[in-house]
Image (tube, rainbow, N blue to C red):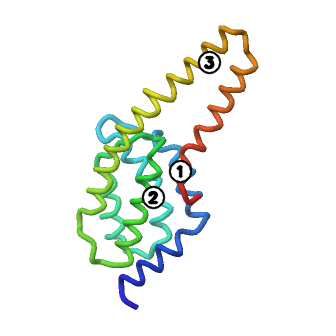
Amino acid sequence: MSNTKKIATTAAKGLPFRLKLSLFVRSLSLQASWNHERMQNLGLLTVMLPWVRTQRRALNQDRVFCRRYYEFFNTNPYLANFVIGGLVRLEDDRAQSEAMEPGMTTMFRDSLGRAFASLGDQLFWLGIRPAMAMALCLLGLHGQMAAVIALVGVFALAQPGSRLPPGL
């Protein structure tokens, strides 16, 4: 079986549900290890570890993998799962075939992370949250306290749902 067919077969099969769920649950704490020097790099590495555990690797390969994800990384937490999903796919392709360029995952992570950081900040912080605050203020001024509580509840429950990756 050629490498291209092997990669296509792996991609069509997809990841096991438990691995997807583990990646998703860990992605909820992406911001937990935020630092001034490298932003969300440790959170991203922590999210990627369940995938690494599924691979047969040598200690030296694990060190290279950890160094690759120890570099600077920052994105919007609501859109981070799109970047994480792409990185898992690229790393899976790299594990199946050595034909990938050395800097491909780093270029993907950096370019998509920056784009989603900008897009997410504009969408969530400059769009959805101010609109939600205005709606709550207007409902509160009209004495609709039940609607205010319901809207806050729906918004709180929808936040983790907005972070679900498309295939989960």
Residue at 58 percent across and 38 percent down: it is 159
3 and 1 marks in contact (CB < 8 Å): no
Residue at 29 percent across and 46 percent down: it is 72
Packing grade of label 2 (10 A; few <14, some 14-19, many >=20) is some
Residue on which the image places disc 2? 85
Tell me the kind of residue under disc 2: Gly
Element under disc 3: helix
Q: Is residue 95 left or right of residue 49?
A: left
Residue on which the image places disc 1? 26
Element under disc 1: helix
Q: CA distance from mark 3 to mark 1?
A: 31 Å
Q: Position of residue 8 (x, y in %)?
A: 43, 78
Q: Position of residue 155 (x, y in %)?
A: 62, 31
Q: Position of residue 44 (x, y in %)?
A: 41, 50
Q: CA distance from mark 2 to mark 3?
A: 34 Å
Q: Is residue 94 above or below residue 84?
A: below
Q: Is residue 14 above or below residue 133?
A: below
- Nearer-N-terminus badge (3/1): 1
Q: Is residue 59 above or below residue 161?
A: below
Packing grade of label 1 (10 A; few <14, some 14-19, many >=20) is some
Tell me the kind of residue under disc 3: Leu
Q: Position of residue 33 (x, y in %)?
A: 43, 41
Residue at 36 percent across and 70 percent down: it is 59
Q: Residue furthest bottom?
A: 1
Element under disc 2: helix
Packing grade of label 3 (10 A; few <14, some 14-19, many >=20) is some
Residue on which the image places disc 3? 136
Q: CA distance from mark 2 to mark 1?
A: 13 Å
Tell which of 65 and 131 is nearer to you.
131
